[in-house]
Amino acid sequence: MAVDFARRARSRLPRRGPAGRGLRIAACLVLVATVVAGCSLTGPATAKPTAAPSLLPTQANGPTFSQTGSMTAARESATATLLSDGRVLIAGGENGSTYLASAELYDPRTGTFSPTGSMRSARNGHTATLLSDGRVLIAGGQNDLDILASAELYDPKTGTFGPTGSMVDRRVFHNATLLADGRVLIAGGSLAALAELYDPSTGNFTLTGPMSHPRFEPTQTSLSDGRVLIAGGSDDSGDLASAELYDPATGRCGATGSMATPRNGHIAARLSDGRVLIAGGYDNWMITVSAELDLTSAELYDPKTGTFEPTGSMTTPRFEPSATVLYDGRVLIVGGVHGPESLASAEMYDPATAKFNAIGSMASGRIGHTATLLSDGRVLIAGGFNGLSDIASAELFLP
């Protein structure tokens, strides 16, 4: 009976925008509760560039967007992972009401996408993490009505996905962060406040210290000292301003300062000086659904003091944009949604001036897209939802 109720609840949801995603998260709370009720459990976005780019010629007219090849399938909420050889793995996601198991590779040398092996399970709301050995860990997500605990590994050498251990808890809209010792921290996306670690040497997940409370869609950012900042997100009472730090040395989460504003669907990006930029999002879908609650405000987290402080505001309110730290230290913020509109506009945050500046627009509005910093400094922006349908098109940002 509970599963039937969950299916009916999900079928009534608006598909897009703050109303749609907020209510979809509420439905996921129902779905996860349904899964947990039927199981016996014992426990429970943004990479910083690490390699020097092969720099492109300076654009005479400033930063621009240009079209590149289209994906083999329209995808919203897929994952995108830069592989060791410079190609980009795009996996899973959603096309209309269909969850996808298929995956494809983008080759920056040719500007084209080509199919690769398919995942063992269709997934949406999953994570993808590049491991130290070049393989990619795919974990959790949603498959039709199932919240998944399963995980799999993509091997670029064979172009295939293979099995690995399953998570302790079933998770969707969670986060995954590669730690300095090669393990992967998995947190959020569950009714339980527990976090877990994946060890590539054993292929197993094990529990680690619990978070302060459950979070759906928080941001999770690796700090310069190896700790991980987990900030904001939502629980069954609404959006959260609180944040916490995971310390791999102790295996525990501890409280840190809170943001000035509760946020869900925001971005987090680690700057070159070690601080973390938090911007945009939505506050507070559990109380009311209104475009007026899309946020332009931004704040900076300082790991030295454990506090957040305000910085310049974005030029446009944005819920669920993408954020990419460029090789020069600036942060590219693209797309998202404001009210009922999928945004094509983009802006740049400059840490030197603490200001956001509009920099033009993509060819298409996008939410649920991917944004991947390529080895040569360009940014691949692929897929998403344009306000009418899921799309396969992709564009390149040229700094």
Image: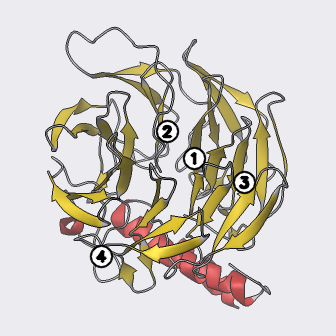
User: Which amino acid is tagged 3?
Assistant: Ala
Which residue bears the numbered disc 3? 122
Reading the chain from its start, which is encountered first: label 2 or label 4?
A: 4
User: Which amino acid is tagged 1?
Assistant: Ala
User: Which amino acid is tagged 2?
Assistant: Gly
Reading the chain from its start, which is encountered first: label 3 or label 4?
A: 3
Q: Is residue 253 left or right of residue 61?
A: right
Seen in the picture, residue 275 relative to 188 is either above or below; the reply is: above
Q: Where residue 36 appears, x then y in whole percent?
A: 70, 85
Q: Where residue 326 appears, x then y in whole percent?
A: 37, 31
Q: Is residue 257 visible?
A: yes
Q: Is residue 180 left or right of residue 297?
A: right
Marks 2,1: beta carbons within 8 A? yes
Which residue bears the numbered disc 2? 383
Which residue bears the numbered disc 1? 78
Q: Residues within 10 Å of mark 3 (few under 14, many from 20)?
A: many
Q: Distance from label 1 to label 3 (Cα)?
A: 11 Å
Which one is in front in this view, the residue at disc 3 or the one at disc 4?
4
Reading the chain from its start, which is encountered first: label 2 or label 1?
A: 1
Seen in the picture, residue 322 relative to 255 is either above or below; the reply is: above
Q: Residues within 10 Å of mark 4 (few under 14, many from 20)?
A: many
Q: Residues within 10 Å of mark 2 (few under 14, many from 20)?
A: many
Which one is in front in this view, the residue at disc 2 or the one at disc 1?
1
User: Which amino acid is tagged 4?
Assistant: Asn
Seen in the picture, residue 233 relative to 301 is either above or below; the reply is: below
Q: 184 and 283: which one is in front?
A: 184
**Which disc is residue 284 wearing?**
4
SS at circle 2: loop
Q: Distance from label 2 to label 4 (Cα)?
A: 27 Å
Marks 3,2: beta carbons within 8 A? no
